[in-house]
Image (spheres, rainbow, N blue to C red):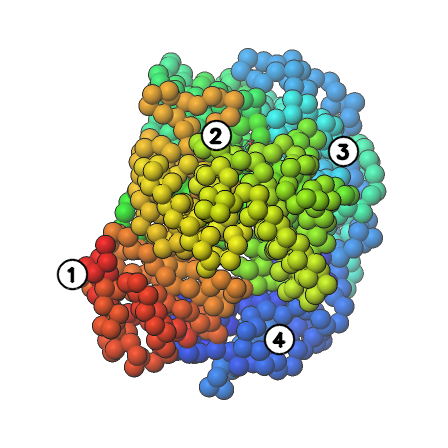
C-alpha cells in the first residue's frame, strides 16, 4: 500500500552525511546510509557490504560482508579520503532468503582542510563605500541606517583550447554572495553562505560549474551584500560591526581540471576589479533597493569593456582557519505562490494577497517604467481594521523593497539579498498590476519533506498545514522564532519544543547538525548554553531553563530519530558541562540561581512557578546526559549523571509535590513536565503519577476543556494526556475554537501558527505590536501528536532510528486519518478509516523493523488481518488486549486489519 513499491528486499535512497550525493564534504569518516524497502512480510536484511572507490577506480574501502540486521548505515573507515575527489560507493544487502540487491551513489570531498585554501579575502574599496547617497523618496534613509551598496566583483580568465573536464567552485563570503560565471548564475543557493557565528566558523559551499566554463575568455563574477555579517541582525539597533564585521568580503577558488591532467586554480586576489552594484542597499530586515539607472549590463560576461567605476579589489586577509564545509542544506527558492487577489487601493497603489503567510520575497514584472520611476513594495502579515497593510508588529524591520526604473520599460524584479515574513504586499508606483505580474517566492532551508498527514476534519488538516508553513518560514539557515520582525533569532527553546514535530515533517538531520555547531560554539567556557544560537551580542547570554537545555534535548532527540550516535558523541562534553554548570550554581538541586532571563513557561495564560519549571528541566537534562553517556559506553559518566538525576527527582518531589499529589503551582505545565520527564516518586506507573494524571485531566477539563500552557508545556499536553489514557481530552483541545486554542487563529484567517494564543481577539483586536508574530512555530508543537496520536504513527519508547514502532491510532470521533513518514530505515505508514461499524487499519513497517500495533476495536476477539482471524495471520503475534484495543506485534511488511468500530463499544 503506502510503502515503497519494491518486490524483494532492496537498498535505496543512498545518502552520505544525511545528504543525497553531497558535493564538497570535509568529514573524514562520513556516514553512508541507505533505506530499505520490500513488499514481503518479515523481510529483514541478513547482511550488508559497502564498497567505496576513488576516482581512479581503486577500492578505498570494503566492509566485507557484515551480519547486522539492524544496520542502515556505516561510518567510512577506509583509506584516508583526499581533498576535492569524487568517490563512488555501493551497498549490497542480502535478505533472509539469500537474494542480494545493490545500489550505488557518490560523494565528493571538498577542501578538507583550511590549509588547502589559496584564495584571499577581497572586498570593494571601503573608502568608496563610505560615500553615502542621500535617500530618495520611498527609500529607507541610507544615511540613518548607514546602509551601504551591494558590490560587484569580476575577474576575467582565459581557458586555452579545450574547456576543462571538471570545474569546481569553492566559495564563501563574510556577508552574502551570489556568483555568476559567464553571465550564468552559479548554483541555486539563496542567502549563501547562511548564518553562522562568523567569529567561530564560516561555511563554504562547493559548486559544480563544469558546464559553465568555455574555451577562450571567461568571467567569474560575484555580487556581495551585508547579510547577517554586516547588516542588521535581531533587535539590535546597531548595524555594521555590532556583531561581526563592517563590510562584506568574498573568498572563492575555481579549480579547473584539464583533460591532459593539468590543474589550474583561479582565486580571489588583488587582480579582481570591483564596483558598486545597482543595489543601493540590501539588508535582511530593512529590505533592498535596486536602481536600474546604475546598472552596467554585461559586467558578468566576457567582452565587457566598461572600466568606469571599477576599482582594484582590496585584499583584506588570507585567514582560512575558520572555514568548514557547510553541512546543512542551503536555503533555496523552493516554491511560488500566485497572487490570490490584487486590489487597487490608490491611484498607483495595489494590495496583493498571496493567501499564505510565508518567508521569502516577491517577483514582480513592472510595466511602463521610466528612468527614475520608483516602485515600492511593503510587506506585512495582516491587514488592519481598515483593510490597510498592518506593519506595526514588524518593529524596526522596514521590510520594504524599492525598484528604480532605468532604460527598460518592462523589468522583472526580485530582490536577492533580503527576505521578509508576509502574506500581503503593497505595491506603489504602478498604475496597473495584473495578478500574473506578481508572484510570491518561498525561501527556506531545503530540508527534504518526509512526512504527510491527513484526516477527515478539514480544520485539523488546516492546522497541520499551518504548522508545516511555520516550519517552512522559520527554517531559514538556522531555526528562527519568526521571519518578519527585527528578531528572527535561533531561540533555543522554540527549536527544542518544535523539534519532534519538525522531524516528522522533514528530514532535518543535516539542518540541525549545522545548528548544533552554533549551539556548542555559543556555550560559555564554564558550560552555560546560550538563549539564542548563533550567539548574538545584545541578547541575554545565559541560557534560561528550557532554553539552555536545548543543548541537551536536541542532540538526544536527533539521536533517537536518526539513530546516529554522532549526535551524542559530538555533544556529550557540552551536555555534561551544561549540567555541571547548573549543578555548580544550585548545589541544593533546586534550580534558582543562574537562570538567565528565566522565561519560565513563556507566554502561558496560566504561569507555572519558575522553580518548578527550572528544576524539572534540570532533572531532564541530567537524565538525558546520563543516557547519552550510557549509549556511548561512558559508564562512569552514565552513573554519575544517573545518580544526580535521581537526586534531582527526589528533590523535585520533596520540594514541589504534596503527599496528596499536588504539584506546586497546580498548573497544567507543572503536571505535564512532571509526567513527561518522569519526575514523580515511583515513576510513571506509580501512585503519584496517577494522581498527577488525574489532576492534569481535571485542570484541562476545568479550562473548558482547554490548554493554558505556554511554550514549554504546549508540545507535551496531547502526548501526556494520551499516555494518561485521556486521548479524548487531547481531541477536545484540538477541536476547541475559542482562545486559547489552535483553531481560534485558523478561524480568524491564520495560515501559520501565532506566537501568542491571543495574537488577535475580536474584543481587543491585535495584541501589543511590541511582540506579536503571526508566524512562530512553538505553539505548533502539537503537530507531533497529529502523526503519533491521531494517525498513530510513532517510534516505540527506547527505540532509535525507527527500528521499533508503536502504531497506536487515537480515532476520537474522526472518520479517518493517515500518515506517512520516510524514516532512516524506510517508509512507515498508517491509515485508518471507520465506516458502517467497521474500523480498517493499514500499517506499513519497513524491513528489519517491528511494530506493536494497538488496533482500536469494540471487540478484540473479532479483529482480522488480511481477511483472516488475527492470530492466524502471517507476521502477526497477538500480545493481548487493552481497553478498547487489541495489541499485537508485527514484523516488516504491509498489514490490513479490520475491527469492530471502538466507538460502538467504548465512548
Ligand atoms: C520572544 C519570542 C521567542 C522566545 C523569546 C523568549 O522573543 O517569543 O520565540 O523564545 O521571546
Q: Residue at x 66, y 58 (%)?
A: 643
How many numbered discs sit on the rendered protein?
A: 4
Q: Residue at x 36, y 25 (%)?
A: 761
Q: Is residue 44 visible?
A: yes
Packing grade of label 4 (10 A; few <14, some 14-19, many >=20) is many
Which mark is in front, 2 or 4? 2
Q: Residue at x 68, y 51 (%)?
A: 575
Q: Is mark 2 within 8 Å of ligand 1?
A: yes
Would you place residue 313 above or below residue 829 in this image?
above
Q: Residue at x 53, y 81 (%)?
A: 46
- 341 relative to 34 in the view: left or right: left
Frontmost residue, 681 versus 838: 681
Would you place residue 551 above or below residue 796 in this image?
above
- 244 relative to 500 in the view: left or right: right
Q: Dot 4 corresponds to which residue?
A: 50
Q: Are marks 4 and 3 in contact (CB under 8 Å)?
A: no
Q: Dot 2 corresponds to which residue?
A: 773
Residue sitting at the far bottom: 98
Q: Quadrant of residue 264?
A: bottom right
Alpha carbon separation for disc pair 1 and 2: 45 Å
Assign the N terminus to one quadrant of the image.
bottom left
Q: Dot 1 corresponds to which residue?
A: 836
Indicate the secondary structure of the residue bearing disc 1: loop
Q: Dot 3 corresponds to which residue?
A: 123
Alpha carbon separation for disc pair 2 and 4: 48 Å
Alpha carbon separation for disc pair 4 and 1: 51 Å
Amino acid at each position: 500500500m503506502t510503502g515503497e513499491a519494491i518486490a524483494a528486499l532492496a537498498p535505496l535512497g543512498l545518502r552520505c552525511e544525511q545528504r543525497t550525493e553531497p558535493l564538497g564534504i570535509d568529514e573524514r569518516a562520513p556516514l553512508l546510509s541507505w533505506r530499505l524497502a520490500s513488499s514481503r512480510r518479515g523481510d529483514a536484511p541478513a547482511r550488508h557490504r559497502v564498497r567505496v572507490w576513488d576516482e581512479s577506480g581503486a577500492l578505498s574501502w570494503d566492509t566485507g560482508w557484515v551480519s547486522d540486521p539492524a544496520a542502515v548505515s556505516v561510518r567510512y573507515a577506509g583509506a584516508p579520503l583526499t581533498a576535492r575527489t569524487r568517490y563512488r560507493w555501493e551497498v549490497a544487502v542480502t535478505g533472509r532468503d539469500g537474494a542480494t540487491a545493490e545500489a550505488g551513489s557518490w560523494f565528493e570531498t571538498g577542501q578538507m582542510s583550511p590549509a588547502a585554501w589559496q584564495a584571499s579575502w577581497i572586498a570593494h574599496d571601503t573608502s568608496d563605500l563610505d560615500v553615502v547617497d542621500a535617500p530618495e523618496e520611498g527609500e529607507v534613509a541610507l544615511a540613518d541606517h548607514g546602509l551601504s551598496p551591494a558590490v560587484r566583483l569580476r575577474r576575467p580568465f582565459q581557458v586555452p583550447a579545450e574547456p576543462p573536464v571538471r570545474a569546481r567552485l569553492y566559495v564563501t563570503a563574510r556577508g552574502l554572495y551570489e556568483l555568476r560565471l559567464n553571465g550564468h548564475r552559479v548554483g541555486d543557493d539563496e542567502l549563501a553562505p547562511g548564518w553562522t557565528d562568523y567569529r567561530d566558523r564560516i561555511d563554504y559551499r562547493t559548486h559544480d560549474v563544469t558546464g559553465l566554463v568555455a574555451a577562450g575568455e571567461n568571467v567569474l563574477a560575484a555580487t556581495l551584500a551585508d547579510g547577517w555579517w554586516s547588516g542588521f541582525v535581531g533587535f539590535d539597533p546597531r548595524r555594521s560591526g555590532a556583531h561581526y564585521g563592517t563590510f562584506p568580503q568574498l573568498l572563492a577558488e575555481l579549480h579547473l581540471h584539464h583533460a591532459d591532467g593539468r590543474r589550474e586554480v583561479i582565486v580571489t586576489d588583488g587582480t579582481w576589479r570591483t564596483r558598486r552594484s545597482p543595489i543601493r542597499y540590501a539588508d535582511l530586515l530593512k529590505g533592498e533597493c535596486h536602481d536600474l539607472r546604475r546598472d552596467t549590463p554585461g559586467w558578468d560576461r566576457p567582452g565587457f569593456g566598461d572600466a568606469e567605476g571599477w576599482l582594484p579589489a582590496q585584499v583584506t586577509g588570507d585567514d582560512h582557519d575558520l572555514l568548514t564545509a557547510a553541512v546543512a542544506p542551503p536555503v533555496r527558492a523552493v516554491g511560488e505562490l500566485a497572487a490570490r487577489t490584487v486590489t487597487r487601493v490608490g491611484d498607483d497603489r495595489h494590495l496583493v494577497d498571496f493567501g499564505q503567510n510565508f518567508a521569502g520575497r516577491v517577483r514582480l514584472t513592472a510595466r511602463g517604467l521610466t528612468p527614475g520611476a520608483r516602485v515600492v513594495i511593503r510587506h506585512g502579515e495582516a491587514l488592519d481594521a481598515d483593510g490597510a497593510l498592518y506593519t506595526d508588529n514588524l518593529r524596526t524591520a522596514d521590510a520594504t523593497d524599492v525598484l528604480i526604473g532605468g532604460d527598460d520599460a518592462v523589468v522583472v524584479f526580485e530582490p536577492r539579498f533580503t527576505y521578509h515574513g508576509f502574506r500581503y504586499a503593497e505595491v506603489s508606483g504602478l498604475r496597473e498590476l495584473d495578478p500574473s505580474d506578481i508572484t510570491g517566492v518561498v525561501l527556506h532551508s531545503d530540508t527534504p519533506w518526509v512526512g504527510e498527514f491527513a484526516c477527515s476534519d478539514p480544520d485539523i488538516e488546516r492546522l497541520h498545514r499551518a504548522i508545516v508553513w511555520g516550519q517552512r518560514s522559520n527554517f531559514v539557515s538556522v531555526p528562527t522564532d519568526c521571519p518578519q520582525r527585527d528578531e528572527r533569532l535561533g531561540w533555543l527553546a522554540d527549536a527544542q519544543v518544535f523539534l519532534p514535530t519538525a522531524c516528522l515533517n522533514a528530514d532535518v538531520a543535516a539542518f540541525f547538525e549545522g545548528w548544533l555547531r552554533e549551539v556548542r560554539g555559543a556555550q560559555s567556557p564554564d558550560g552555560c548554553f546560550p538563549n539564542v544560537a548563533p550567539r548574538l551580542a545584545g541578547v541575554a547570554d545565559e541560557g534560561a531553563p528550557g532554553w539552555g537545555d536545548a543543548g541537551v534535548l536536541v542532540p538526544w532527540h536527533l539521536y533517537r530519530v536518526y539513530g546516529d550516535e554522532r549526535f551524542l558523541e559530538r555533544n556529550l562534553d557540552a551536555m555534561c558541562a551544561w549540567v555541571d554548570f547548573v549543578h555548580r550554581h544550585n548545589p541544593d538541586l533546586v534550580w534558582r540561581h543562574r537562570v538567565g532571563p528565566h522565561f519560565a513557561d513563556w507566554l502561558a495564560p496560566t504561569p507555572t512557578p519558575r522553580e518548578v519549571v527550572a528544576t524539572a528541566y534540570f532533572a531532564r537534562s541530567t537524565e538525558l546526559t546520563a543516557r547519552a553517556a550510557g549509549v556511548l559506553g561512558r559508564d562512569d559518566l552514565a552513573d554519575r549523571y544517573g545518580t544526580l538525576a535521581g537526586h534531582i527527582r527526589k528533590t523535585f518531589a520533596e520540594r514541589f509535590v504534596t503527599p496528596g499529589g499536588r504539584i506546586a503551582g497546580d498548573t497544567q505545565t507543572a503536571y505535564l513536565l512532571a509526567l513527561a520527564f518522569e519526575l514523580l516518586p515511583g515513576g510513571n506507573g506509580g501512585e503519584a503519577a496517577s494522581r498527577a494524571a488525574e489532576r492534569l485531566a481535571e485542570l484541562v477539563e476545568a479550562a473548558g476543556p482547554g490548554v493554558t500552557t505556554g511554550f514549554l508545556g504546549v508540545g507535551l499536553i496531547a502526548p501526556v494526556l494520551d499516555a494518561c489514557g485521556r486521548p479524548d481530552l487531547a481531541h477536545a483541545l484540538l477541536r476547541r475554537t475559542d482562545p486559547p486554542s489552535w483553531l481560534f487563529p485558523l478561524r480568524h484567517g491564520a495560515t501559520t501558527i501565532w506566537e501568542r494564543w491571543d495574537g488577535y481577539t475580536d474584543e481587543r483586536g491585535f495584541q501589543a505590536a511590541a511582540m506579536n508574530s503571526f508566524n512562530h512555530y512553538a505553539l505548533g508543537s502539537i503537530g507531533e501528536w497529529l502523526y503519533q496520536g491521531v494517525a498513530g504513527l510513532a517510534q516505540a519508547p527506547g527505540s532509535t532510528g525507527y527500528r521499533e514502532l508503536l502504531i497506536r491510532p487515537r480515532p476520537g470521533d474522526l472518520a479517518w486519518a493517515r500518515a506517512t513518514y520516510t524514516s532512516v530505515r524506510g517508509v512507515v505508514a498508517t491509515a485508518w478509516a471507520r465506516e458502517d461499524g467497521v474500523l480498517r487499519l493499514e500499517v506499513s513497517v519497513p524491513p528489519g523493523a517491528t511494530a506493536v500495533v494497538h488496533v482500536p476495536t469494540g471487540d478484540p476477539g473479532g479483529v482480522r488481518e488480511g481477511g483472516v482471524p488475527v492470530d492466524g495471520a502471517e507476521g502477526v503475534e497477538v500480545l493481548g488486549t487493552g481497553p478498547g484495543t487489541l495489541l499485537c506485534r508485527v514484523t516488516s511488511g504491509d498489514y490490513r486489519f479490520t475491527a469492530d468500530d471502538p466507538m460502538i463499544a467504548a465512548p
